[in-house]
Image: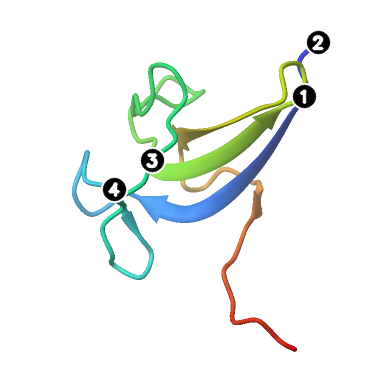
Amino acid sequence: MTSMKKWWIGGSDVWNEGQFEWISGQNITYTNWGPGQPDDASNDGTTNADCIQYFFRTVDQSFAWLDLRCDSNISSICESKAFI
């Protein structure tokens, strides 16, 4: 059984299909899509996978991005200013 860890990273194409941007409105210039991604396909068979999920597969120690429905219940990774 493959174990996966998943996190939202704040990117989506919800406003313009196929044009991914960060929640700040900035265009995404670096990508790390998994094979066949983004495919706009959801686990429920619909085609509304608009948000970017960052996932880690323990079986091969790999990280990649997938597009997934924005209402999927997973944790988030957030950026903040450093506190020293």
Residue extending farthest top? 1
Relative to 84, does residue 77 appear above or below in the rendering? above
Residue pointed to by mark 3:
31
Q: CA distance from mark 4 to mark 3?
A: 10 Å
Q: CA distance from mark 1 to mark 2?
A: 10 Å
What's under tag 3, amino acid-wise? Thr
Of label 4 and label 2, which has the lower sequence position? 2
What's under tag 4, amino acid-wise? Phe
Q: CA distance from mark 2 to mark 3?
A: 27 Å
Residue pointed to by mark 1:
58
- Please report contact status of discs 4 and 3: CB closer than 8 Å, yes or no: yes
Residue 13 in the image: state x and y as whole percent.
29, 47
**Residue that appears at 59% across and 82% down:** 81
Residue pointed to by mark 4:
20
Quarter assignment of residue 78 = bottom right
Residue pointed to by mark 2:
1
Q: Of circles 4 and 1, which is in front?
A: 1
Of label 4 and label 1, which has the lower sequence position? 4
Q: Secondary structure at mark 2?
A: loop
What's under tag 2, amino acid-wise? Met
Q: Of circles 4 and 3, which is in front?
A: 3
Q: Secondary structure at mark 3?
A: loop
